[in-house]
Amino acid sequence: MNPFAYHRARDEQDATATAADDGTSFVAGATNLVDLMKLGVKTPGRLVDITRIEGLDRIERTDDGGLRIGTLVTNSDLAADPVVRRDYPVLSRAILAGASGQLRNKATTGGNLLQHPRCPYFQDLAMPCNMREPGSGCAAQGGPMRLHAILGTSAACIAAHPGDMGVAMGVLDAAVETARPGQEGRSLSLEELYRLPGERPDIRTVLEPGEMIRAVVLPPPPGGTHVYRKVRDRASYAFALVSTAVVLRLEDGYIQAGRIALGGVAPRPWRNPHAEEAMTGEPPSEALFDRVANILLAEAVDRSALGRDGAPGFKIDLARRTIRAALWQAVERSEGGAGKTAGEAA
Amino acid sequence: MNRHHKMDSADRQNRLDGMAQGLIGTDVPRPDGMAKATGTATYAAEERREGMLHGVLVRATVPGGRVADVDTDALAKALGDDVTVITDARLLQVPAQGTDGKAPPQGPDLVHYVGQPLALVVAPSFEVARHGARLLGIRYEGGEEGHFDPEDDATPTELRDKKTVDIGDLDAAMAKAAHSVDAVWRTPGHVSAAMEPHAAVAWWEGEHLTVRSALQMLKFNRDELADALGIPAENVRLLAPFVGGGFGSKLGISHEAVGAAIAARQLGRPVRVVLSRQQVFEAVMRRSETRQHLRLCADEEGRLTGIGHDCLVSNLPGQDFAEPVIQGSRFAYAAPNRHLSLRLARVNRTCAGSVRAPGEAVGLTALENAMDELAEAIGIDPVELRLRNVPEEDPTDGKPFSSMMMAEVLREGARRFDWQRRNPIPALRREGDPRREWLRGMGMSLLVRGNILDEAEARVRLLPAEDGAPVRAEVETDMTDIGTGSYAVLSQIAAEMLGLPMERVTTRLGDSALPPSPGSGGSWGAGSSGSSVYLACLELRTRLARALGCDEGELTLRDGQATGGNHSRPLAELLDGGTIEAVGHIEPGKTAKERRQATYGAQFAEVEVSRHTGEVRVRRMLGVFAAGRILNSRTARSQCLGGMTFGIGMALSEELEHDPRDGHLVNRDFAGYHIPVNADVPQLEVHLMEERDPWANPMQSKGIGELGICGAAAAITNAIHNATGARVRDYPATPDRVLAAMAVAN
Ligand SMILES: Cc1cc2nc3c(=O)[nH]c(=O)nc-3n(C[C@H](O)[C@H](O)[C@H](O)COP(=O)(O)OP(=O)(O)OC[C@H]3O[C@@H](n4cnc5c(N)ncnc54)[C@H](O)[C@@H]3O)c2cc1C
Ligand code: SF4
C-alpha cells in the first residue's frame, strides 16, 4: 500500500481539525478502509484514528426518550444492547444480518454508515469506475453485477449502499450528529447525509472536509412489530441483493402505521412516504402489499446491462417479492404467529 | 530390501483384516491435529529465512497481446533501488496441470488472460513490494483478438474425439422411447477455494535449490520446477510438510514457486512469494464452466434405453486439459444406446484445470438432475428408477466391475433418510396458502467416481528401544497431507501391520528427498501411498518372522509383542538393538485394465424454499458411501462431509463470474465468490458401508476424497423441485434463478 501518515486524535477538535486537510481520512474500525487501501483503491496520505476519543462509545437515553448512539459503539455492542433489542429490535436484527461476528466486533456505527459500495469494478484498479476515478466510466454497467442499485442511480454509477444497519436506522428516522472543524456540528437525516450519484458518484455524502460523525440519534421507540428481511446469495456473510426493514403497527386487523425501508437497491437506505401512507388504515392483503411495492419501485430501473443469463432485471422483481414477504412476516408476527425468519439469521 | 508388488491380479487375502492391533478402519485422530489446532504446524508463507526478500506478482490487465514495454521509472523514483523487477522469460504463463511433470508454457511477455502474472517485484518487505507492483507501468501491443464466451458462435471449439462414445443409435432410441428427457444444463466455473493461499519460499545453496511451498504432488512438482528453471531435477528439493487445502489447485507447480526461485537466484537471498486471495483466483486453475446437453430415454418400466451427454467446456488456447464431464456417464447406468461427447472452447479466461473430482463433480450433477426428471416423467420413485438401471458390467466397454455397491448405497440411504415419507407432488402444488412461505422438498442423487491406483514408494523403519522405551516405527514418503489425514492414515497402516500403538509410529511427509509417491490428487493418495507403506511393512514382518522362527503368515504382532510358531517375544528383542527398514513399492497392473473400479454413494437432501423470494435452505442431508475398505472412519467421514459441503456450494451459491468484454474474473475474493458458510450447512450425516475391493490394491481400499461431491448438488436441486415444481438447470440455484424456474413451472 502507499505510505501514509498516522495520527491518533485526542479529541473531536483535534480529529476534525487534522482531518480537514486534503488526502486525510478518518479511520475507526478499519474493516473497510484498510481493505481498500490494500487494494490500492484508497490512498490517503494520512489517517486520523478516532478510536481513542473519549465518550464516543456510549449508548445513552435522550431527553425525549430516544437513544443516542456514539459513533464508536461497535456493531456487536449495539446489536446486543438490551434497550435496542427491546425497543428497536429491527436495528439489532439488521446488524446481526450483516458481515460476521469478527467484523461486527470491530465495525463502528459511523464506519458502517460510511462504508464504501461493494462494486467489484470499484475494487479493481484496472477497471474504469467513476466513483474511484471521476470521468473514467462505469464498467459495472456492462458486466455481471448483482449488488447494484435500481433506485436513485445515474448513468454515471449504479452502486448500492451495501449496509444493513443503515436500513434499519432509516426506518427508525435516525439522525446523524456531526462535529465540524471550527464550527458547530449539525444534525442530518440519512436522506440528507447521502448524496445520490448524479454526475459525481465519487462524492457520496454531504459531509465536508474534516466533518465527523459523532453519533446517531434515534427518536423514541416506534412500537409495533419489527422485521428485517435480507435476501442474499447465501444464508449468511453476504451482502444483500435486497433487504427490507419494516415497522408495522396492526390493530384489530387494520394497519395503524407502517414504515418500510429498502436496502441493497439504492445508494442509500430507501424510503418513500407515499408507500407508507398507502398502508395506513388498511387491512393487510396481497393487493395492498403489491401497491406498496409498486409505489416504492415506481421509479426503479435496472441499468446493469446484463443480469445473469443475459436477462436484466431480476432485482426489481426480487425487491417486490421481498417487500411482500417482509410485510406478511410482520403481519403474521403481529398476529402472534411465529413468522419464520430464515432471512434474519446472522 | 524392498518389497515390490504389481497389481496384476485380485488380492483376496485381506491381510489387513487378519492383523491384531485393531486400529485399521477405526476413527484414529490425526497425529498432526493438535499442532494444527494450536498453530504450531507452520505453512509455506510462515517460513522465515535469514535475509529473506518478498516478491509480489504483477498482473496483466488485458486479455491478450504482447508486453511492449515495462516502465520502471515511477517505481524507481518512489522506492529507489531497494526494489528489483523480474521479467525473466522463465516465468510461467499458467500453472502446470496435475501430473504433467514438465514445465507449463512460459514467457511472461505473451498475454493470454487478465490476471496472468507478468513480472515479479521484489523488495525487503511485502508492503514495499506490493506498492512497487502497483507502480510498474506495463504497455501492451496487439491483442485485439480474443474470445470470452464459450458459447458464442465465433468462439473456436474442437471436439475431443478420443472421448466420444457412440454405441447403438441414440436418436432412434429417443424417437421411439416411451419416456424421455431432453434438456440443457449449465454449471459455472468454480475455484478450489483452499484456505491456504499459494505461497513459496525459495533459497539456494550453490547449485541446489530448496523451495518450501504449498503443493500436492512433489514428485511431479520437482520435475516441473526443474524443467521450468532449466536445472537438473536432482538439484531441486521441495518441502511441503503441511498444506492448507488443495482440491486440485496445488497439483502443478505455479507462478509463486518459479518466481521465488528465479528471484532468489538472481538476488542471492531467500525470496518469499505469497499470492493474494485475488491472485489465487486469477492466476490458479479454475474448474471450467460446462454446458451439458442430456438426453435420456426409457421404456414403460423405467429401464433406460439410451443416454446422451454432449458437453461443452473451455480452456485457454493451447491448453490440453478439458474438464472430463462425461467420465461418469460411461458407466453410471446401463443402457443399450449411448452417445457421449466433449467439446472444448478456446477462451481467454483464466486457465482451466482440475478442481476436486474433475468430470464427475459437474457431470453426475446434471445426469442426476436428468434422472430425476425422467423419474417424474415415468411416474416412478427416483430411487426405484436408479435401482432398475444398475449396470451388471461397464456398459461402455463391457468390463466387469471390481466390486460395486450401487444398489446397496441407494437402499441404505433411502432407509436411513426415511425417503418413503417423500410426497412426489411438489409442495407448492399441494400448498395453496401464500402465508405458508417455506416449502419443503426432498431430493436424492447417485454419486459415482472412478478409482485409480498409482505407482508409489514408501520407506518404513523399525527402530530399537531407547532407554527401555518400546520399539517405534518411522514412515517416510514424499506424499503430502493437504488436510485429508495422510499423516493419520499412513501411521495407522504401519501401526496395524507392525503391531504398535499409534503413538509409536511417526510419519514424515512432504519432502521430495523421501521416496516418491503420486501425491494427493485424484483420490488416489491413501490407496497408493498406503499400499506402499503396507508392502514395506509386509517385508519387515517377513524379516521379523524369520527372526522369530515362523512364517510371516503365522506371525501376530500386537503392542510390540511378536507371536508365532509357539514363540512369543518382544519386538525389541527381535531387533536386538539394530534398525531394520524396507521400501515398499506398489505399481498398478492388469487389474486397472481388466476391471471397472469405482466408488459409489447416494445422497439425500431436504430443503426449504421461500415461495416469495426463492431463497433455499438445506435442512438436512445424508450421504451413504461405499469405497472399499475404510482405512480411517474419521478422516473418511471428513472427506465426505467436505464433499457434501462442496455440493451445497455448487448447488446454491458458487459461481465464477467473467466479464463478457474481456473475460476477466469479476468476483475474486470470498466476499464475492460464495462458498457455503456455517449457516448454509445443516447437520450432515455420513454413513460408510463395509466393502472390500480385491482388485483395487492390496488393502482392498478405494479412494474417497472426491466421491462426496460427485452429484451432491443434484440431490439439492432435485429437492428444490420437490418443494416448488421448479427445475433449475442453470447452476447455482440463487434466489433469482429459483424464482425464474418457479415462474416457468407454475
Ligand atoms: C467480508 C465482509 C462482509 C461484510 N458484510 C457486510 C454486510 O453483510 N452488511 C453490512 O452492513 N456490512 C458488511 N460489511 C461491512 C462492514 O460492516 C463495514 O466494513 C464496517 O461497518 C465499517 O466500519 P469500520 O468502523 O470498520 O469503518 P472504517 O473502515 O474505519 O471506515 C469506513 C469509512 O468510514 C469513514 N469513517 C469512519 N468513522 C467515521 C466517522 N465517525 N466520521 C466520519 N467518517 C468516518 C472512514 O473514513 C472510511 O471512509 C462487510 C465487510 C466485509 C469485509
Ligand atoms: S457502479 Fe459506481 S462504483 Fe461501480 S464501477 Fe460504476 S461508477 Fe464505479
Image: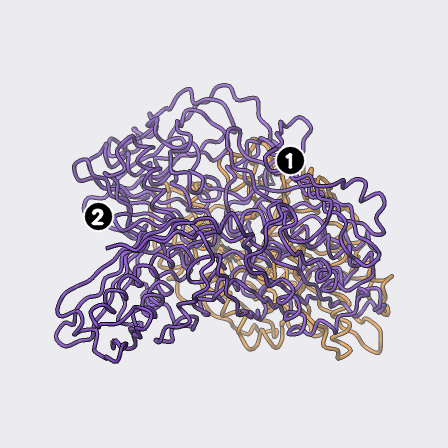
Chain colours: A orange, B purple
Amino acid beneath label 2:
Arg
Subunit of mark 1?
Answer: A
The x and y percentages for residue B625 are 56, 65
Disc 2: which residue:
B49
Q: Secondary structure at mark 1?
A: helix
Q: Is residue B216 visible?
A: no
Would you place residue B73 above or below residue B739 in this image?
Answer: above
Would you place residue B183 above or below residue B607 in this image?
Answer: above
Q: Splitting the image into 4 quarters, where does residue B79 fall?
A: top left
Q: Residues within 10 Å of mark 2 (few under 14, many from 20)?
A: some
Give the residue displayed 35% in from the left and 45% down from the top: B274
The x and y percentages for residue B497 are 33, 68
The x and y percentages for residue B324 are 57, 43
Left or right for A246, reference B347: right
Disc 1: which residue:
A142
Subunit of mark 2?
Answer: B
The x and y percentages for residue A38 are 41, 45
Q: Nearer the viewer, residue B409 or A133?
A: B409
Q: Splitting the image into 4 quarters, where does residue B25 fall?
A: bottom left
Amino acid beneath label 1:
Gly
Left or right for A3, reference A94: left
Q: Secondary structure at mark 2?
A: loop
Would you place residue B315 above or below residue B640 in this image?
Answer: above
Left or right for A143, reference B118: right
Q: Nearer the viewer, residue B619 or B2?
A: B2
